[in-house]
Image: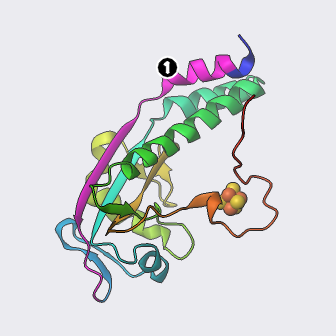
Amino acid sequence: MGAVAAGCAEARGLLQPLLLQATARLDCAADLRVPDLGLTWTSPALRRVLAGAERVTVFAGTVGGAISDAARAAFSAGEYTRAVVLDACGSAAVRALSEQVRSQAEPGYGATAPYSPGYEGWDIADTAGILRALQARRIGLFLSEAHYLVPEKSFCGVIGWVRGGAEAAYGCAVCRLAGCRYRRREVVLA
Ligand code: SF4
């Protein structure tokens, strides 16, 4: 087994995915408000992302700390390929959890792009309110003093639901950063 395949196999045994989510009515009158969850947001950027949404799903998830611990240990031991593969698998697993939320659209509703505190135009300090609303400590997820999620391979954010709306594209598909070397491309394997 090659180093990449071995790292992926090891990663599967280390992932501990846990996801919390709550869906509620979104009030867009003045500030953005989710009364049932006690959340209020003032970000104009988030208002643009959630345009047309009647309901919103607030979510937080983690794949646990074991995979990051293993990646750090591998790096310290000079096993750089293994460290990189473990780290990448952890990131991919976190993204898959986010996609899982987005795939839960009710019939007749389209999902907005997932958006998180810390993204362009949304204060990272709003992370705390989302974690509080979901009681994220139940899954061992909390904030560092610098507002970073702990464990490292974790995420939180919102997805809006637009009645009759189309699925919104997001990420590299709509990013306007020219010449980004990390842009995702469809790869066709022969
Ligand atoms: S094109 Fe680059 S900067 Fe834009 S979303 Fe993709 S990876 Fe990020």
Q: Nearer the viewer, residue 171 or 87?
A: 171
**Count of numbered labels shown in the rendering:** 1
Relative side of 129 to 81, left or right? left
Relative side of 6 to 43, left or right? right
| Residue 52: quarter of image | bottom left
Residue at the image position 50 percent from the left and 29 percent from the top: 66
Relative side of 39 to 94, left or right? left
Q: Amino acid at mark 1?
A: Gly
* Residue 116 part of the magenta-drawn span: no
Q: Position of residue 177 (x, y in %)?
A: 74, 68
Q: Nearer the viewer, residue 103 or 182?
A: 103
Q: Vertically, is 126 above or below 12?
A: below
Residue at the image position 26 percent from the left and 73 percent from the top: 26
Residue at the image position 56 percent from the left and 24 percent from the top: 11
Q: Position of residue 151 (x, y in %)?
A: 47, 42
Q: Which residue is mark 1?
A: 13
Relative side of 86 to 35, left or right? right
Q: Position of residue 184 (x, y in %)?
A: 69, 50
Q: Give the quadrant of the N terminus.
A: top right
For ligand 1, which image quadrant applies? bottom right
Please identify the residue farthest to the left as the structure is shown: 36
Please identify the residue farthest to the bottom as the structure is shown: 30
Q: Nearer the viewer, residue 28 or 18?
A: 28
Q: Position of residue 63 (x, y in %)?
A: 45, 36
Other residues around mark 1 within 10 Å, as few (<14) / some (14–19) / many (≥20):
few
Residue at the image position 75 percent from the left and 23 percent from the top: 79
First to last magenta residue range? 5-29
| Residue 35: quarter of image | bottom left
Q: Vertically, is 120 above or below 110?
A: below
Disc 1 secondary structure class: helix
